[in-house]
Image: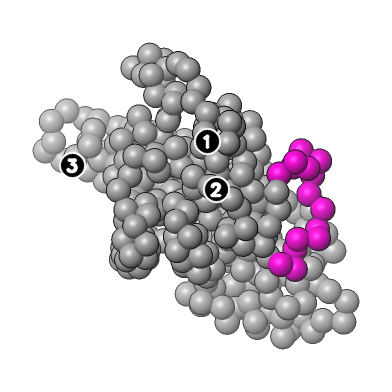
Amino acid sequence: MVKRKNRHGEKGLRLGIVGFGMVGRASADVVLERKDLTLAAIVRRLDSLAQPLPDVFSKVPVVSHTAQVAHMDGALLCVPAAQVFEAAHDCLQHGVPIVESSILHGEAFQIHREAIHRLAVRFDVPAIVGAGWDPGALSLLRSLFGLLVPEGELATTHRVAASLHHTAMARQVRGVKEALCTEQVAADGARQRYVYVEVEPGVDVAQLSAAIRADPLFLHDETFVFPVESIAALEQEGRGVVLERRSGLGSQGHQRLLFEARFDDAMMTARTMVAAARALPGLSPGAHALLDLPLSALWGEQAFDAERTWL
């Protein structure tokens, strides 16, 4: 298939990265490695512009606002959950389609989607919401399991791992030099948050811990805060999940589907967001979930090759 070039003479879609934490860095790496995409810009906070980036990004414009970029076909919002709506508004009002990956489920996701939808319709621009690992790629797998075994039970087991959005929030607390938040499951099945922090000199740990626990992201879970000397020594590369779908009593046959994975959460989220971005040019204005999109749209210009390889 012939690779199309955009009006700048560059390869494929021009995508911007808003935010440069773990997911932002991973997304930038993915865009750079893809032959059908161009990294248009990295958008960072004004107080982060002076921070050096790896040499691989030396030719990529680094700006403080999407309006400073001449043209983008889409923006990947890689900011903490509390900042997504504001970032979405900034992009959409300037005519830039977005992909975001907020970790929301059920009613909370529906409320979030409707809020983004109103913005996207108002500015006549498409948006894709919940396009990360979960919700996102894992949602597609759960949905497929439900189609194949319509009557039964689905068990989802998450392995201990870093929680990206909770980690991002903890990093913003005054006095925190670096942070890492993980999810644990207590003996009674209750979810717990273990927050490891590198503390700035002279900071009151008790007050810092109270500030973290008071944030809405942590209010509904038991949260433990542990000061450590080095977050780097605690970094966990992998996350894991097990999906198991069993057919119910009285159903035809005895089906059992099992999916098990161990992976890097930031990279999985980044790859899902980048795949979703390929679908943006064909979407109508408004907010779309990953389940709304045909699988071929996620492959973009590679759809024909993907069909030949995977069907």
- Element on which disc 1 rests: loop
- Element on which disc 2 rests: loop
Tag shown at residue 220: none
Q: Kindly identify the residue that appears in the image at 64 percent across and 35 percent down.
A: 32
Report the Cα–Cα distance between label 1 and label 2: 10 Å
Report the Cα–Cα distance between label 2 and label 3: 48 Å
Please indicate whether residue 145 sits to the left or right of residue 4 in the image: left
131 drawn magenta: no
Tag shown at residue 7: 1
Contact check, label 2 and label 3, Cβ < 8 Å: no
Tag shown at residue 151: 3
Q: Earlier in the sequence, mark 1 or mark 2?
A: 1
Tag shown at residue 71: 2
The image shows residue 161, relative to residue 174, as above or below, that is above
Question: Can I make out residue 52 in this image?
Answer: yes
Tag 2: amino acid: His
Residue most extreme to the right: 201
- Percent coordinates x, y for residue 279 in the rendering: 39, 39
Q: Earlier in the sequence, mark 2 or mark 3?
A: 2
Please indicate whether residue 71 sits to the left or right of residue 153 in the image: right
Which image quarter holds the N terminus? top left
Q: What is the span of residues highlighted in magenta in the rendered image?
A: 46-60
Report the Cα–Cα distance between label 1 and label 3: 50 Å
Return the residue nearer the eye: 241 or 4.
4
Contact check, label 1 and label 2, Cβ < 8 Å: yes
Tag 1: amino acid: Arg
